Amino acid sequence: MRNAASVDAIIVGGGIAGASLAYFLTQRGMTDVMLLEREPQPGYHSTGRSAASLVEWDAITTLHQLKAQSARFFRNPPSGFSEARLLDPTGILVLFQEPMWTAAAQVASTLAAYGTVANLLSVSEVIERIPVLAPERFNGGVWLPEDGRIDVHGLLWSYLRHAAEHGAQRRCGVEVQRILVERGRCCGVATNAGEFRARWVINAAGAWAGKIGALAGATPIPLTPHRRTIVTFDAPAGLDVRGWPLVHSESHHLYFAPESGGLLASPMDEEPMEPCDAHPAELMIAQAIDRLAILAPPLVPKTLRRTWAGLRTFSPDRVHVVGEDPRVPGFFWLAGQGGCGIETSPAVGQIATDLLVDGRSDNPVAAAIAPARFSVR
């Protein structure tokens, strides 16, 4: 490797997006890579606070395509990639009330084209699986039998381990303070640990991606972090929930799933806020319990084990932003993953790698996630 102060690519952000890119870049031969993380360890923010699930269901076609492409990686990762399996196919159950149910049933019939297995369940078939549900609160469900829980820790550290084995550097506790731009091209970063120069600077800063973009004078893409709250609690006495899938109700803005012998639940809140170390709000915790009381009354807990919150960062069209900035050459966006950064990381990491190594990608999704769509014409 050349002098550590001059590399091919600097990745700003050590969450799942940055880690996946480091992995795929080094697999393609770009091994002179430096990953910079402000926190003491990778994956501290959104990556470490997710529901850790693959849900191949999305109303936005681009996101569904990215999830379906990534699912193939999770089910059949490269030999030796991880010590344990990445995906536990516990299934995902998505519930709907009318008029959403009729629309969902029509969408489900089209998913096979993307390789997604989706079965329609009647109310009685849903109740057979999850008997605590109130049958009058939904009209049917979409069953995704091949989806389930992702081993996020194993995925993140497998990306990082293999990247390091192929030469990538990882430096934590390093905060980017300025983006270096010379003669109109991005050429590096200035940090609390000194200046580092590179042919490419990749903005994988999660909730802080908008601020990093502003430092570069890049296209002003409005990326907005939104808080998402999760609570955990004991299952009712005598009820074994360990084999349950994640149950997601679009109509009630609620999901719940098994967690460490008990359950977790989220009110699927999306409160916009500045990037920060997110903490749960009492109102959102109360909403989670209220919505459980409507959809699955027997699950309402008397006490909670734990609460936490993370930030999900969205672009205006709620689709990823991946590609070289139209305004500042050498500055590359890998941002706006919303709530599906983990479950789309294989596909997005490979698209970004294609663009950085080859200057183009054959993936048909690449154009839909390019930052050029936000350029002022």
Image (tube, rainbow, N blue to C red):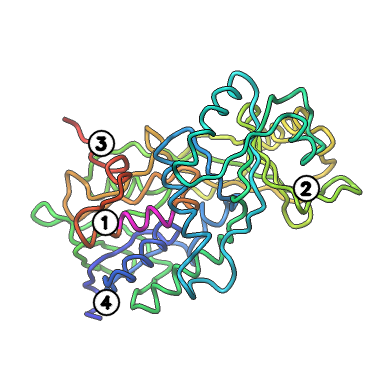
Position above or below: 104 against 80: above
| Mark 4 lies on residue | 4
Rendered residue at 63%/34% (across/down):
120
Query: Regarding mark 2 in the picture, which secondary structure is present there?
Result: strand
Q: Is residue 369 above or below residue 98?
A: below
The amino acid on which the numbered mark 2 sits, given as a three-letter code, is Phe
Distance (Cα) linking label 2 and label 4 = 47 Å
Q: Secondary structure at mark 1?
A: strand
Which residues make up the magenta segment? 345-352
Of the image marks 2 and 4, the number of the one nearer the N terminus: 4
Give the residue pinned by disc 2.
Answer: 233
- Quarter of the image with the N terminus is bottom left
For marks 2 and 1, the one nearer the N-term is 1
Q: Between residues 38 and 299, which one lies in front from this camera angle?
A: 299
Which of discs 3 and 4 lies nearer the camera? The answer is 3
Tell us which disc is closer to us: 2 or 4: 2
x, y percent for residue 312:
49, 43
Find disc 1 in the rendering and name its residue. 178
> Badge 3: few (under 14), some or many (20 or more) residues near its Cα, within 10 Å?
few
Q: Is residue 207 left or right of residue 176?
A: right
Find the distance from the CA under tag 1 to the CA under tag 3: 25 Å
N-terminal of the pair, mark 2 or mark 3, is 2
Q: Which secondary structure, mark 3?
A: helix
Q: Residues within 10 Å of mark 4 (few under 14, many from 20)?
A: few
Name the residue at 73% across, 24% down.
137
**Earlier-in-chain disc, 1 versus 3:** 1
Q: Amino acid at mark 1?
A: Arg
Which-is-in-front pick, marks 2 and 1?
2
Query: Where is residue 292 drawn, in percent x and y?
Result: 75, 33
The nearer-to-camera label among 1 and 4 is 4
